Image (spheres, rainbow, N blue to C red):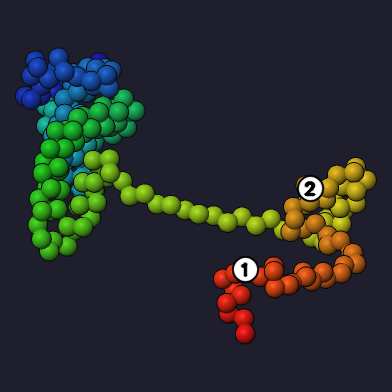
């Protein structure tokens, strides 16, 4: 129940009542719904000073109180969570109605050669059409180990009889000291391919 004199809000027609969303339906009475409608339809009222358009919306909804009483009642109604949710519900519905206009504006900008936002509009149209830019990111991760850690892992691998390269990878496996002999292949005229023999003197 609402406290304070008011008359019916003119824009509250029967079809409106049939189409209320859950948030508008959850409001306690038609006067509260009228206040929400007045606030949204007036674009939030004047919004000057502490009023922020709340008192103006109450007056549009038919509230006939003193300025002080109207301001107090407006503050109470418009700071109620249910009213905030109802306002958002109505605004979302109205924004959906504006979608075709926004689409036409975007297409017009995209089709206007030399328009400063032509490129951005074209990208926006592609995004909304599901044709998005593919960005490939390649990352190189390098794992480093301190010489002390390499030594500990090498000792552990040796004690377990595991090839150090399996634990450390070939880059970190310690070099193996060994003696080696360079073996030169024996080359004779018979081992040289025919195609190269022709180049010999």
- Lateral position of residue 23 relative to residue 46, left or right: right
Q: Position of residue 44 (x, y in %)?
A: 19, 40
Q: Quadrant of residue 140?
A: bottom right
Comes first in the chain, label 1 or label 2: 2
Q: Nearer the viewer, residue 146 or 41?
A: 146
Q: Is residue 109 above or below residue 38?
A: below
Q: Nearer the viewer, residue 200 or 57?
A: 200
Question: Which residue is at a point 74% across and 72% down the rendered structure image?
Answer: 187
Question: Which residue is at a point 21% across and 57% down the rendered structure image?
Answer: 119
Q: Is residue 84 above or below residue 168?
A: above
Q: Is residue 166 visible?
A: yes
Q: Which residue is mark 2?
A: 167
Q: Position of residue 200 (x, y in %)?
A: 62, 81
Identify the mark at residue 180; answer none if there is no mark.
none
Q: Position of residue 33 (x, y in %)?
A: 19, 23
Quadrant, the C terminus: bottom right
Specify the farthest residue to the right: 159
Q: Which residue is mark 1?
A: 193
Find the distance from the CA under tag 1 to the CA under tag 2: 45 Å
Give the secondary structure at mark 1.
loop
Q: How many marks overall? A: 2
Q: Quadrant of residue 146?
A: bottom right
Question: Which residue is at a point 19% across and 19% down the rendered structure image?
Answer: 20
Q: Are marks 1 and 2 in contact (CB under 8 Å)?
A: no
Category of crowding for the residue at label 1, using alpha-carbon neighbours closer than 10 angstroms: few (below 14), some (14–19), many (at least 20): few
């Amino acid at each position: 129940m609402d406290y304070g004199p008011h008359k019916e809000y003119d824009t509250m027609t029967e079809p409106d009542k049939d189409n209320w969303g859950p948030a508008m339906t959850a409001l306690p009475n038609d006067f509260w719904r009228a206040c929400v409608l007045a606030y949204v339809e007036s674009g939030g009222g004047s919004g000057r000073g502490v009023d922020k358009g709340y008192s103006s919306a109450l007056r549009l909804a038919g509230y006939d109180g003193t300025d002080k009483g109207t301001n107090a009642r407006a503050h109470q109604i418009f700071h109620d969570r249910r009213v905030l949710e109802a306002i958002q519900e109505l605004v979302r519905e109205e924004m959906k109605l504006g979608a075709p206009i926004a689409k036409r504006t975007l297409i017009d900008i995209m089709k206007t050669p030399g328009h400063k936002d032509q490129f951005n509009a074209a990208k926006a149209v592609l995004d909304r059409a599901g044709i998005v830019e593919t960005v490939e990111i390649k990352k190189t991760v390098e794992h480093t180990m301190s010489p002390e850690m390499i030594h500990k892992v090498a000792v552990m691998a040796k004690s377990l009889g595991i090839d150090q390269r399996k634990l450390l990878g070939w880059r970190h496996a310690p070099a193996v000291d060994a003696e080696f002999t360079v073996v030169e292949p024996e080359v004779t005229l018979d081992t040289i391919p025919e195609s190269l023999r022709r180049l010999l003197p």
